[in-house]
Image: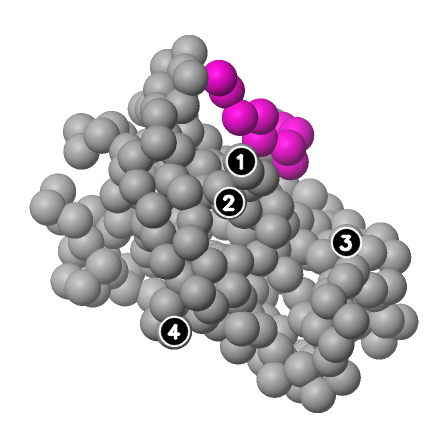
Amino acid sequence: MYTISDRVSYSRIGKDGKIGVAEMINCLQDCALFHSEDIGHSAATLAKRHRAWLVSAWDVIFVRRPMMAEEFFVHTWPYKMTNLFGQRNFLVETPEKEVLAYADSRWFFFDSENMKPAKVDDDEKEAYKPEPAYEMDYSSRKVKIPDGLEMRDRIEVTHSCLDTNDHMNNGKYVEFAVGYIPADFEVKEFRAEYKNAAKLGVQMVVNAGESDGLYYVVYADEEGNPYFISEFTPA
């Protein structure tokens, strides 16, 4: 298990004084990347070999979002590794061991030179020793798009959206998506599936709406092919 400590800053809270949903997802992503950095398998190191780990799915359960100035820990560990994929858990808790959130995530190894999935190298498998999976309900990594979503907007991928892989940063998808859910919608669970990497200059169509009590935000191209599918479950 790898652990970082954090504290809720003013720049990451909403009007309710709690850390935002997107900001919490960024905490999880940061923890995973710090883990890679500290074991000598950083994104920069992998880039020299034209390799990267890209997230393909999130399932995050929010028990309680911490308040302004509150301290918390983020723990992460891999629990399964195949030739193409890695699966990683997260646990967010207070210093008193109160669980604030927990999550499942799926990542795939990527060949950035040929722009396709790559076989996980033996040294990567050796670096990430699997530990027992967290006890939670494991849902499908696939997020089904319901019928009846409405076109709400268009988003252009600008330079400020890009990560070191020249793709739209994973956290930016979530940050923008949260802006389309109702203001009074308290999120209990967030699920997302990344389908296609959006690059600089891409215009994404935003479709959003409610279905069976859940709220969906989908980014797609003009033909309806999705880049990102997100599902929000209310508390």
- Foreground disc of the pair 1, 4: 1
Instruction: Give the SS element for disc 1.
Output: loop
Of 192 and 29, the residue lying toward us:
192
Disc number lying in front (3 or 4): 4
State which quadrant residue 218 falls in: top left
Q: Is residue 142 covered in magenta?
A: yes
Looking at the picture, how far across and down is residue 193, in whole percent?
A: 57, 41
Q: Residue 159 carries which label?
A: 4
Which of the two discs, 2 and 3, labels the residue nearer the N terminus?
A: 3
N-term mark: 3 or 4: 3
Residue topped by disc 1 = 224
Indicate the secondary structure of the residue bearing disc 2: loop
Badge 1: residue crowd in 10 Å (few <14, some 14–19, many ≥20): few
Q: How far is mark 3 from mark 4, CA to CA?
A: 28 Å
Give the CA separation, mark 4 to mark 2: 19 Å
> In front: 226, or 189?
226
Three-letter amino acid code of the residue under disc 1: Gly
Please, what secondary structure does the residue beneath circle 3 have?
strand
